[in-house]
Image (cartoon, rainbow, N blue to C red):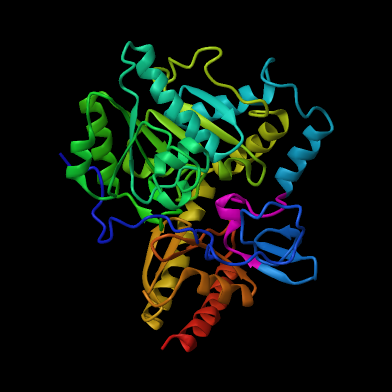
């Protein structure tokens, strides 16, 4: 059987506190003391945006290739999304899930038509989608008379959200510190260790959960043959395969969902970020069988699938499901990566590797350079990027980025790297 997990050289890396390019010890910047200090924020306030550009309250324009951490997949202030939201806002905002929601049924039917799924549950974020996926897998085995099968296998370097359960799923000690006993039911294996994965499977295992590309974990791609191997392994042992496509979904890799590259289907999938194009939307997709345990009363969300969210998600799907749109993402990704490969050749002392899939791109930096340094240098060039673990900086541009904007982003990134190179001994 094909090894179901890749074999990176640094399989033991974990997600650092500087996941957004800021060291955990960075003092809070100027701002309101009323806001809880759970983020080390950059001292910028943005007033408006258009496409790939953001304008600060001081009038400075920034080229945004972070997309709100892969959320603004269609850029800022996309006219189709504005129209959909404005039209719906004048009609109805919220009724709750005690009643049928017309837009929710329409978007669910579209997602079913475009994917492996038969059933969809709507929520508000990636963390909620991942938490719901975990519940769905456990409930599935319970409903089949196997309540002992409640453990989920996950991988080092994973990031599935900030709830207690999703933090426990990822198993990052730095993120779990201080929050009491870990939520149980997760078995963590090193990213890339096939033998450890096989050993971890037991009579209590319910599912395997993985990101097709680890985003926060350092833009580490799971090769297609490894996803196929995971599908085979789940089928062999009667496990459910859960894919976390919160960051990789809605066209980010050049397919509507990243697992399509491998020609496989999960049993359950978590989706969010790009699905709302900036409006909070999450979803759990599942096959009829995998969703069979989710009966009335087993799960819920007050705001999930509300009319505003569904109007925007419907408009996003109008654009993201187009074949020409997805083909354009591939072409843009190729152009971007070719330019970044040239940067790697020019600055090997700063960039050690260009990695990723589609427009989910990672620059692995040399040991002497920290992601926060490059993020800061880029900020000085009015370029917005996002840090990650494994000493990586992420480039997550809007999927609507143009050729001239790619060239401009590379030019600004080049100047930022030169700033770093001058400081590095």
User: x, y percentage for residue 209?
Assistant: 36, 37
The answer to which of 74 and 367 lies nearer the viewer is: 367
Q: Residue at x 41, y 19 (%)?
A: 139
Q: From the image, which quarter does the C terminus lie in? A: bottom left
Where does the image place residue 366, in percent across and percent down from the top left? Answer: 37, 75
> In the drawing, does residue 364 fall left or right of residue 55?
left
Furthest residue toward right: 90
Q: Is residue 399 visible?
A: no
* Residue 269 shows in this picture: yes
Task: Please tell me whether residue 237 belongs to the stretch shown in magenta.
Answer: no
Split into 4 quadrants, where in the image is the N terminus? top left
Locate residue 225: give its quadrant: top left
Q: Which secondary structure class fits the magenta region best?
A: loop
State whether residue 98 is above or below residue 342: above
Q: Which residues are magenta?
A: 63-78
Q: Is residue 41 left or right of residue 131?
A: right
x 77%, y 29%: residue: 93
Above or below — where is 64 with respect to 135?
A: below
The spot of residue 385 in percent (x, y) is 56, 65
Indicate the position of residue 410 as horizontal and vertical percent values. Answer: 53, 74
Q: How many marks?
A: 0
Q: Which of the 4 image quarters holds residue 406?
A: bottom right
Between 238 and 184, the one lying in front of the other is 184
| Camera-side residue of 98 and 55 | 98
Question: Is 79 situated left or right of 305 in this image?
Answer: right
**Going 57% across and 44% down the picture, which residue do you hit?**
273
Check if residue 69 falls in the magenta segment: yes
Asked where in the image residue 405 lies, by quadrant, the reply is: bottom right
């Amino acid at each position: 059987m094909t090894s179901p997990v890749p074999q990176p050289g640094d399989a033991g890396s974990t997600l650092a506190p500087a996941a957004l390019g800021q060291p955990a010890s960075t003092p809070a910047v100027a701002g309101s003391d009323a806001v809880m200090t759970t983020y080390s924020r950059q001292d910028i306030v943005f007033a408006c945006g258009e496409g790939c550009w953001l304008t600060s309250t001081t009038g400075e324009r920034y080229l945004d290739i972070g997309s709100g951490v892969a959320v603004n997949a269609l850029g800022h202030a996309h006219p189709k999304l504005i129209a959909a939201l404005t039209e719906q806002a004048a009609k109805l905002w919220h009724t709750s899930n005690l009643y049928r929601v017309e837009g929710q049924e329409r978007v669910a039917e579209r997602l079913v038509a475009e994917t492996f799924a038969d059933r969809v549950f709507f929520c508000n974020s990636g963390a909620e989608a991942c938490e719901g996926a975990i519940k769905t897998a456990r409930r599935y085995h319970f409903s089949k008379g196997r309540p002992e099968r409640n453990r989920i296998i996950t991988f080092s370097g994973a990031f599935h959200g900030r709830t207690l359960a999703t933090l426990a799923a990822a198993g990052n000690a730095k993120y779990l510190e201080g929050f009491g006993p870990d939520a149980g039911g997760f078995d963590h294996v090193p990213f890339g260790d096939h033998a450890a994965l096989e050993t971890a499977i037991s009579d209590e295992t319910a599912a395997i959960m993985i990101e097709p590309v680890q985003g926060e974990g350092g833009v580490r791609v799971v090769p297609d043959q490894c996803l196929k191997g995971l599908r085979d392994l789940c089928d062999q042992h009667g496990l459910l395969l859960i894919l976390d496509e919160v960051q990789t979904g809605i066209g980010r890799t050049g397919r509507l969902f990243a697992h399509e590259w491998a020609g496989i289907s999960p049993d359950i999938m978590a989706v969010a970020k790009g699905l709302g194009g900036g409006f909070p939307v999450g979803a759990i997709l599942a096959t009829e069988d995998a969703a069979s345990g989710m009966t009335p009363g087993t799960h819920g969300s007050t705001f999930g699938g509300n009319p505003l969210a569904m109007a925007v998600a419907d408009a996003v799907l109008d654009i993201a499901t187009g074949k020409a749109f997805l083909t354009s993402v591939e072409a843009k990704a190729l152009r971007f990566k070719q330019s970044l490969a040239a940067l790697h050749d020019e600055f090997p002392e700063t960039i050690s590797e260009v990695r990723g899939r589609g427009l989910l791109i990672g620059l692995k930096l040399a040991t002497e350079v920290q992601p926060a340094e490059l993020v800061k240098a880029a900020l000085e060039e009015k370029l917005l990027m996002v840090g990650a673990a494994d000493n990586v900086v992420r480039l997550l541009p809007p999927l609507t980025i143009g050729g001239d904007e790619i060239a401009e982003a590379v030019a600004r990134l080049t100047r930022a790297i030169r700033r770093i190179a001058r400081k590095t001994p």
